[in-house]
Amino acid sequence: MSRTYLELSQDGGGAHKFYEVTVQGQVVSVRYGRIGAAGQTQTSTFPTAQKAEAAAAKKIGEKIRKGYEPAVQGQRAPRAVTRRQVASAPSTARAVAPVLWRFRTGSAAFGIHIDEDKCWVGNQAGDVYTLAHGGEVLARYQLPDGVKCLVADDFWIYAGCDDGRVYDLSSKLPFAAYDIAADVDIFWLDIHEGVLNVADRAGRLTVIDHEDEHQWSRGGRGEHAWMVRADDRAVYHGHTRGVTAHAPDGGTELWHTPTQGAVLFGWQEDDAVYAGTARHTVQRLSKATGVIEATYHCDSPVYSCATSPGGRFVFAGDSASSVYCFDRDGTRLWKLGTGGGSALSMQYRDERLFLVTTDGSLVCVDASETAVAAAQQGSVPVARDVKLAATLPTYAPATAAAS
């Protein structure tokens, strides 16, 4: 038996991965992945031992030409996975939002998806919970690493995790549906008609089709890409230098617009994208031209934003545990405290504003005009504290990506 172990580690947050080839008689096994992780294994059988050796030598030669070098496994430490470091200060708002119910997951939560049947929340401990709209906890999914975001496409729902994989949660047994390249540190995802769009720490945009085949990638104009949204016309990519629109096939940059500060979150409607920024604003950009159509001013960096259908109302969550509502033209209608942490993501549905927060809560806010008016006068409902059922069904994923 022969074994060759190679590594490629680039400075500045680039590639940090290994490639191992083992030959045993007529069988060639290739193991690859992030340094320090178990990785994936592929095995091929050849007619003769000589052909197996030749195939292995070819694979090793290809990797060495790409910059891989012989290494000793275990000498180079795994690169730390990026956890989004977020500060959360107490709210300066004079009144607290009318919270109907609150579910505490126990760890900072970035992932949220609200559909007509369920509320989904994913946290940094790798837990994803589903709840009914009334707050009853229905199920728990236990994923291997922190959940950065939850995205849906028709009736499929996916969780992007810190282990570099995207898990399909559409059935009871979740599985790794997409395995992103080992050097991609997922920050945000969007999926449109089965095509996955990945924004990462280095500011790159990677596009993968429904068969887990890499289609194209582009280096971003900036870093820390916390926004990616896609439709039939373009992929909208937000990072430290603003928002860039790319043609769906990756062949053309359609427009680039600098924003007031680094983009920390993105939202889209039919004709506009919304970028929440580090300089206390949400900016509405035309999808067609990239022109900034409106600016919504907050009092602290904006961690999240959302709109009511058609952009009639614009909502924002800041780093000081406050949530805002604006009219379409930019007029601030109200600012209220969340009653807990800062909103890291949000979604509006049927006069309810759902938040996931730095303290790990999924919060349901009554955003109706009547409830908000009462809250501004100091009258809010007693928020129900949702508890886990003792017999809650829990589902863990299969270990391999779908082939």
Image (cartoon, rainbow, N blue to C red):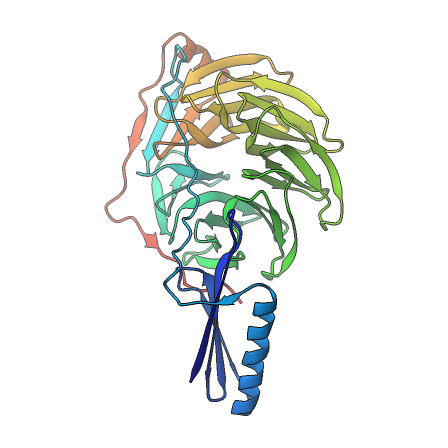
Please tell me which residue is depicted at 47% across the width and 41% down the height of the picture.
117
Please tell me which residue is depicted at 57% across the width and 30% down the height of the picture.
262
Q: Which residue is situated farthest in the bottom direction here?
A: 48
On-image quarter of the N terminus: bottom left
Q: Is any part of residue 387 visible from this angle?
A: yes
158 or 41: nearer the viewer: 41
Identify whether 91 is placed above or below 166. above
Identify whether 263 is placed above or below 391. above
Report which quarter residue 397 is drawn in: bottom left
Q: Is any part of residue 307 visible from this angle?
A: no
Residue 270 lies, in percent from the top left, at 68, 34
Residue 226 lies, in percent from the top left, at 54, 38
Q: Report the label total.
A: 0
Report which quarter residue 189 is drawn in: top right
Using residue 371 as the reference point, say whether residue 226 is left or right of it: right
139 or 179: nearer the viewer: 179
Please tell me which residue is depicted at 44% across the width and 24% down the height of the picture.
319
Residue 263 lies, in percent from the top left, at 57, 31
Residue 322 lies, in percent from the top left, at 43, 20
Q: Which residue is situated farthest in the left direction here?
A: 390
